[in-house]
């Protein structure tokens, strides 16, 4: 806990001649560890006010006395210009007993313990002041890889518990030297109570090891950054300990280095993330506009997907089959130093074995990745909380988060005021791209990206992170929300937890949760009229026991009604059909040709030759009888099938690969030329309107017979799908009824596709409909836990049952 409480000088005597009042001011939000108290201290001195300011478990409290107008000015100044990393959610002002005019001075008090109601700040990229010190001609932090201040540096990645004080972080192992301690204790210094504050004399240090684990480099006096740069120039693969985990790095312009990294990491196709020195380096390879520049320079320093220009190329293995590169700028001083001596971008991909969570401990990195990297750049500051890099892209002229992690987590999402009375609850997300969500005090704390829970190591991280969040945020849930799928690890864990702790269990259908997440993302109040939700993804467990994924729902937070869907088709081989998109293509084509396909009906092109070599009669029997062929209405699986037929992707090595290839293949001229898309039709099955793809397949195959380029086929597919969804919305207008709000909410992983999303938004806006899209949380399953939490809270508030909301 803080113990140093500097005194502010006595306010001007003139103030005592005017009417003085006293107030207690409570500020809630992101107000700890961000320089908020020294900001109050400085403003109190400026306006001649007396009193004190301090942290406690609810945020920041201010006891202040002085002239009423000056107190108003202090509050207004805090609201209008808080510290760079702060976010004020609320300010409450209450009168206090009058104080004597002789009372003088303003001081910063020690932090107080208590039940946690405040927030922990996210890690922040290096600020301009620290960057200036890093490269200054002289100064004690020149070239120091751990430079930080109250405006930047590690936060969540190093915190073990709250309050956010140095002793509760991994910086407790480093005792500040006299010079750093003086900065830390001086409220006029920008490093006042900067918990990670340090310098070369008292902070963490770097070193380079060979990957064999033979200890430090032969020359301990050599500059580790210079050694690392030399290794990268020589084409070696370097394992770098970053902010929230390790990265594997190599020269992104070196085809051999990139190919070796792919082979060693066993990652054959998934695009690699890239690290650039500055915006100018990115402009060599990508088209970069104002929104892109703003996103790249955000304090979260996310990876941004950007269209390639073709003016210069990186190694072909960086992003095979893609038209975008994923670039980020240096997220920390170490990365700035590393890139300062390099004239090429780096591959900077997560330091993990394929499918496993990112390494955060030195020994784990040595043992798990020693066979991947040639050398390791290490430091001795512990990473407490694992944080992958966040990923964003621009969709329809707006930023959209695809993976929410470092730089954004754990900043809470403030829900509409109607959620304020909801009880504390825990939502556990899905199986893929898992996150979990803590709801408390009308705010949703969404965890960082955990990963795919079918991997045992990711499942262990899931449970460890849950425990940490409960302790860090003093969270005691009264209810648990889970997905309806009976086999999700997150759901099994939640059911066991609810039974063990006698907690209320709320089961939320997958696609209802997607739409609710979109509503919460857009701040829609609890009691608004229902929206027409369009949920398009790979698959989710439906209320009828089949796998949904192309759904039209009339939904609010509490309930959803399935109004229509894509036509269900079998998945021959079950999960194998996800890994082998050609199986999904067969399923759709079997609907089109029936037994003629298995009897020798040849399809045009290479895919026809490939399919002729498969056991078509066996597959046909599986599809016809339903043996190991569950039905799915998934839009994502339709993307897979089209990608397979036009020769882009028959088998996948990562989730979403086929759909990404199909989007990347789109001919932009054909897209913009005003041509027609492939036709779909609306039929009916089991009493529901269904979007049927048979006309699309007829037209697509005819194009292939004519020799139409795959890029044009991809464009016509996207155009036709957007048009067809718009037509389905027209069809459903009457079914929505008079209670429909006229809003359409778009959610699910398919809406990460910028081409389809932009086309559909235009279709819907032409119909004068209000369109809600994801902005702050992912449209994919990374946002699912937010939707589950919102649905569970809404239902509990409606029922007020069993004393849960008391």
Image (cartoon, grey):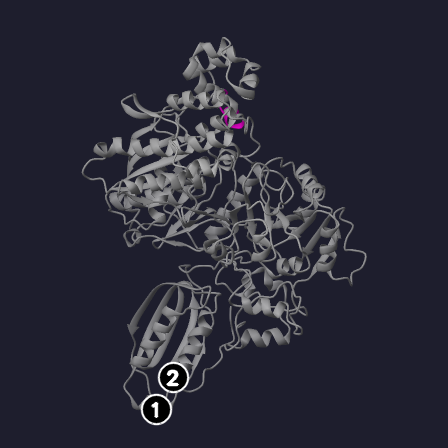
Left of 353 or right of it: where is 516?
A: left
Q: CA distance from mark 2 to mark 1?
A: 9 Å
Residue 80, position as x, y percentages in the image: 37, 69
Could you say which is closer to the camera, residue 162 or residue 49?
49
Between 329 and 350, the residue placed more toward the observer is 329
Other-residue count near label 1 (Cα within 10 Å), few / some / many at <14 / 14–19 / ≥20 = few
* The quadrant where residue 517 appears: top left
Q: Secondary structure at mark 2?
A: loop
The segment highlighted magenta reads 573-579
| Residue 27 place in picture, x, y as percent | 37, 67
The residue pinned by badge 2 equals: 48
Give the residue furthest to the left: 738
At a point 66% along the width and 48% down the height, the residue shown is 249
Looking at the image, tell me whether mark 2 or mark 1 is earlier in sequence order.
1
Residue in front for this viewpoint, 293 or 401: 293
Q: Is residue 806 rendered to the left or right of residue 104?
A: left
Q: Which mark is residue 763?
A: none
């Amino acid at each position: 806990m803080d113990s140093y409480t500097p005194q502010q000088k006595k306010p001007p005597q003139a103030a005592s001649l005017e009417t003085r009042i006293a107030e207690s001011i409570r500020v809630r939000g992101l107000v700890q560890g961000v320089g908020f108290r020294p900001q109050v201290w400085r403003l109190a001195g400026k306006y001649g006010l007396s009193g004190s300011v301090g942290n406690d478990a609810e945020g920041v409290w201010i006891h202040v006395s002085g002239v009423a107008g000056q107190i108003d000015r202090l509050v207004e100044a805090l609201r209008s210009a808080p510290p760079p990393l702060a976010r004020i959610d609320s300010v409450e002002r209450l009168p206090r007993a009058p104080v004597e005019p002789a009372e003088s001075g303003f001081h910063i008090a020690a932090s107080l313990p208590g039940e946690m109601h405040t927030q922990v700040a996210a890690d922040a990229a290096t600020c301009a002041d620290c960057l200036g010190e890093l490269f200054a001609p002289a100064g004690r932090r020149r070239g120091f890889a751990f430079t930080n201040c109250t405006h930047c540096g590690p936060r969540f990645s190093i915190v073990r518990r709250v309050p956010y004080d140095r002793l509760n972080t991994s910086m407790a192992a480093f005792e500040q030297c006299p010079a750093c301690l003086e900065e830390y204790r001086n409220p006029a210094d920008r490093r006042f109570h900067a918990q990670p504050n340090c310098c070369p004399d008292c902070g963490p240090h770097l070193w380079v090891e060979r990957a064999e684990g033979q200890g430090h480099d032969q020359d301990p006096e050599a500059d580790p950054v210079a050694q690392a740069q030399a290794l990268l120039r020589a084409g070696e693969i370097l394992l770098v300990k970053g902010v929230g985990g390790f990265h594997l790095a190599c020269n992104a312009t070196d085809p051999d280095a990139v190919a070796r990294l792919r082979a060693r990491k066993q990652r054959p196709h998934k695009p690699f993330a890239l690290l650039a020195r500055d915006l100018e380096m990115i402009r060599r390879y990508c088209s970069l506009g104002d929104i892109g520049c703003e996103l790249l320079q955000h304090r979260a320093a996310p990876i941004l997907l950007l269209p390639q220009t073709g003016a210069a190329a990186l190694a072909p293995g960086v992003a095979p089959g893609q038209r975008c590169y994923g670039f980020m700028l240096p997220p920390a001083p170490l990365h700035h130093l590393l890139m300062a001596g390099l004239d090429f971008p780096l591959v900077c991909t997560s330091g993990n074995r394929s499918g496993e969570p990112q390494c955060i401990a030195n020994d784990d990195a040595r043992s798990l990745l020693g066979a991947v990297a040639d050398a390791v750049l290490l430091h001795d500051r512990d990473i407490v909380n694992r944080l992958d890099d966040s990923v964003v892209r621009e969709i329809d002229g707006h930023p959209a988060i695809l993976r929410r992690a470092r730089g954004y987590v754990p900043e809470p999402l403030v829900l509409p005021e109607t959620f304020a009375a909801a009880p504390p609850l825990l939502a556990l997300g899905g199986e893929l791209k898992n996150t979990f969500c803590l709801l408390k005090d009308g705010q949703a704390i969404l965890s960082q990206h955990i990963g795919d829970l079918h991997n045992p190591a990711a499942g262990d991280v899931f449970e460890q992170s849950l425990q940490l969040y409960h302790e860090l945020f003093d969270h005691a849930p009264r209810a648990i929300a889970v997905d309806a799928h009976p086999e999700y690890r997150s759901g099994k864990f939640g059911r066991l937890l609810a039974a063990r702790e006698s907690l209320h269990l709320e089961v939320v259908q997958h696609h209802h949760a997607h739409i609710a997440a979109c509503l919460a993302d857009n701040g829609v109040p609890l009691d608004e009229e229902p929206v027409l939700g369009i949920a398009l993804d790979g698959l989710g467990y439906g209320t009828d026991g089949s796998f949904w994924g192309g759904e039209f729902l009339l939904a609010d937070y509490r309930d959803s009604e399935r109004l229509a869907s894509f036509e269900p088709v079998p998945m021959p081989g079950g999960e194998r059909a996800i890994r082998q998109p050609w199986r999904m293509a067969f399923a759709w084509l079997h609907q089109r040709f029936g037994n003629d396909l298995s009897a020798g009906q040849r399809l045009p092109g290479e895919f026809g030759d490939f399919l002729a070599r498969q056991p078509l009669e066996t597959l046909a029997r599986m599809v016809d009888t339903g043996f190991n062929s569950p039905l799915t209405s998934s839009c994502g699986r339709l993307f897979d099938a089209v990608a397979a037929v036009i020769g882009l992707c028959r088998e996948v090595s990562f989730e979403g690969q086929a759909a990404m290839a199909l989007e990347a293949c789109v001919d932009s001229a054909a897209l913009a030329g005003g041509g027609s898309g492939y036709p779909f039709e609306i039929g009916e099955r089991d009493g529901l309107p269904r979007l049927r793809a048979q006309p699309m397949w007829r037209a697509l195959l005819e194009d292939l017979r004519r020799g139409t380029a795959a890029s044009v086929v991809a464009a016509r597919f996207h155009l036709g799908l957007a048009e067809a969804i718009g037509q389905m919305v027209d069809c459903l207008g009457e079914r929505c009824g008079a209670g429909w709000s006229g809003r359409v909410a778009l959610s699910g992983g398919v809406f990460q596709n910028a081409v389809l999303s932009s086309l559909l938004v235009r279709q819907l806006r032409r119909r004068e409909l209000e369109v809600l899209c994801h902005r702050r949380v992912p449209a994919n399953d990374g946002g699912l836990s937010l939707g589950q939490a919102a649905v569970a809270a809404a239902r509990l508030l409606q029922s007020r049952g069993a004393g849960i909301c008391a």
